[in-house]
Amino acid sequence: MPKYSMKDGEVLKKIIIFLILSLYIPITGYALEIDKDLNSGIILSSENDIVPNDTVLSVKSISNNNIISLAKDFALTKYNAYGISLLNAAKRIIPNGEVTLSFPIPSNYNLAMSKKIYVLKLDNNSIDKVYTMNSETVGLYEDLVIENGYVLITTSDFSLDNDIVYLVGTTVINKENRKETTLIDNPNTLDNNFSVLLVISIISIGGVMLLITKLYLDNKN
């Protein structure tokens, strides 16, 4: 019977390191959920090193005559307005790149009419940017994503002096006012999917390691 040697151990060690790296690389490609505002349900997420991990998403609900007027001008029939800042050590910060803001879609929005859902970024009481589905125009309009009951936008627009105001709404609501069947789940971030992904990856890697080890030892025999 062949004896297990130090050389065999080095080979197996390299195999294990390779498999661990194979697991680590795809995991780090996911966006990290940094913070979630419990009152509004808005989520901040980003790639690594864009904002510190202890960044806090500050969200204030806004309602005033200017918001009402802008919503009417844009024909929004259902909407919410928020003042948003990123805080670290209780001070406003600017991200080192783009972050993702995920706004929950209320259950009575007509998700079948997703092209009628908008996120308006306001500046000095006027519309600065319009996020919409499959935007075909340039300049004022930018794309948004509808995912798992959330509206997702990517932005680097934050201020050290003031909250950035976002108006989220739709020009169409369900006429029968029925609740949509779409579940309001968190968007796909590392925090949400990590457990399932880790279990699947560990099982897969374990199987591959056993198979490679068996083949290696069989070849020695």
Image (tube, helix red, strand yellow):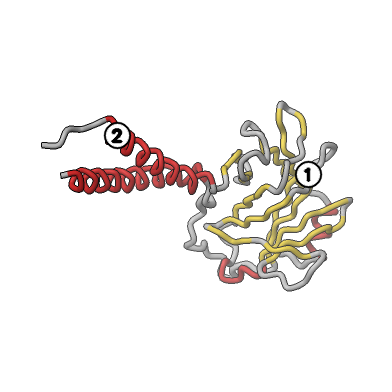
- Element carrying mark 2: helix
For residue 23, which quarter of the picture? top left
Q: In the drawing, does residue 145 fall left or right of residue 89?
A: left
Q: In the drawing, does residue 129 fall left or right of residue 174?
A: right
Residue sitting nearer the eye, 29 or 68: 29
Residue tagged 2: 7
- Percent coordinates x, y for residue 152 in the rendering: 63, 55
State which mark lies toward you, 2 or 1. 2
- Percent coordinates x, y for residue 57 in the rendering: 67, 38
Q: Disc 1 marks which amino acid?
A: Phe
**Sequence-earlier tag: 2 or 1:** 2
Q: Disc 2 marks which amino acid?
A: Lys
Residue tagged 1: 158
Residue found farthest to the right = 124
Give me the residue at 66% from left, 34% from top: 52
For residue 108, which quarter of the picture? bottom right
Other-residue count near label 2 (Cα within 10 Å), few / some / many at <14 / 14–19 / ≥20 = few
Give me the residue at 24% from left, 45% from top: 216
- Percent coordinates x, y for residue 54 in the rendering: 63, 31
Give me the residue at 63% from left, 52% from top: 103
Residue found farthest to the left = 1
Q: Please tell me whether residue 177 is drawn above or below residue 183 in the rendered image.
A: below
